[in-house]
Amino acid sequence: MENLNLFIRSIFIDNMIFAYFLGMCSYLAVSKNVKTAFGLGIAVTFVLMIALPVTWCINQYLLLPGALSWLGAEYASADLSFLGLIMFISVIAALVQILEMVIEKYSPSLYNSLGIFLPLIAVNCAILGAVLFMQQREFTNAWTATVYGVGSGIGWLLAIVCLAAIRERLDFSNVPKPLKGIGITFIITGLMGIAFMSFLGIKL
C-alpha cells in the first residue's frame, strides 16, 4: 500500500514538471507533436525506471558512510559520498547512450524527430532530480526506488503528452499574434500547473 501511495503521489502530487519545474527544457521544446512527445516521455520513463534502482544500490553499498563494510572491517569507516554526483551522472549517461543506440536502430523516425533532445536526456534535470530525491528520502529498498522512478517518469510523460495535444489543437485556434509560439505555451503550462495543484487535496 505504501508503494502504491508513493506511485500515485509521484505522478500527480510530486509531478516533476508542475511541482518541481524539472525537465522544462525538453518539455517545452519537444511538446509540439504528440507522437514525438510520447516517444520522449517513454524514453525518460525507461531511464528513470532503470536509473533509480541502480543508483540506489550504488548509494547503499558504495557511497554511504560505512557502506563498504561488506568488503571487510578495515573499510567500515570509508565515506565515498563525495562521489555521489559523478556516479549518478555516469549511470544516467550510460543508460541514455544505450537507449539512443536502441532507438536509432529500431525507430529511425523517432530518433530523427527527437534530434538533439534524445542525448540531452542525460542532462535532463528531472532524472537527476529524481535520483537526488531518492537519496534524500532514504528509500529502504530498490523496489521502492523503482516505483518512485516509474511514477516520476509517467508523471513527466503525462505532462508532456497533454501539452503536446493542446499545442496541436492550437494550430487551428485564433491565438493573438504576440502570444503565438512559446508565449501561449508558457500560459498553458502555468494553467496546467494550477490544475495539477488540485491533486494536493488527495489524502494518501
Image: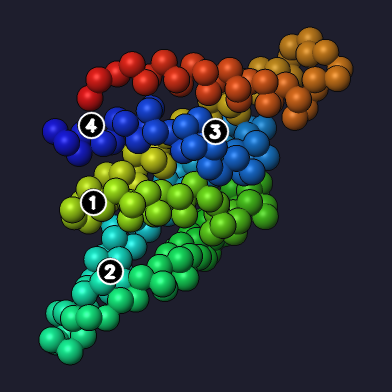
Q: Which residue is mark 4?
A: 5
Q: Could you classify mark 3 by the number of other residues whose Cα lies within 10 Å: few (under 14), some (14-19), or many (20 or more)?
A: many
Q: Earlier in the sequence, mark 2 or mark 3?
A: 2
Q: Residue at horizontal 33%, vertical 16%?
A: 201
Q: Residue at horizontal 38%, vertical 28%?
A: 13
Q: Which residue is mark 1?
A: 139
Please say if the residues under marks 1 and 2 sit with CB atoms less than 8 Å apart: no
Q: Label 1's element?
A: loop
Whole-angstrom CA distance, mark 2 to mark 4, is 27 Å
Q: Which residue is mark 3?
A: 160
Residue 66 percent location from the top left of the image: 21, 74
Mark 2 vs mark 3: give the one in front: 2
Q: Check disc 3 and give the amino acid type.
A: Ile
Q: Which residue is mark 2?
A: 64
Decide: is 30 above or below 164: below
Q: Check disc 4 and give the amino acid type.
A: Asn
Q: Quadrant of the N terminus?
A: top left
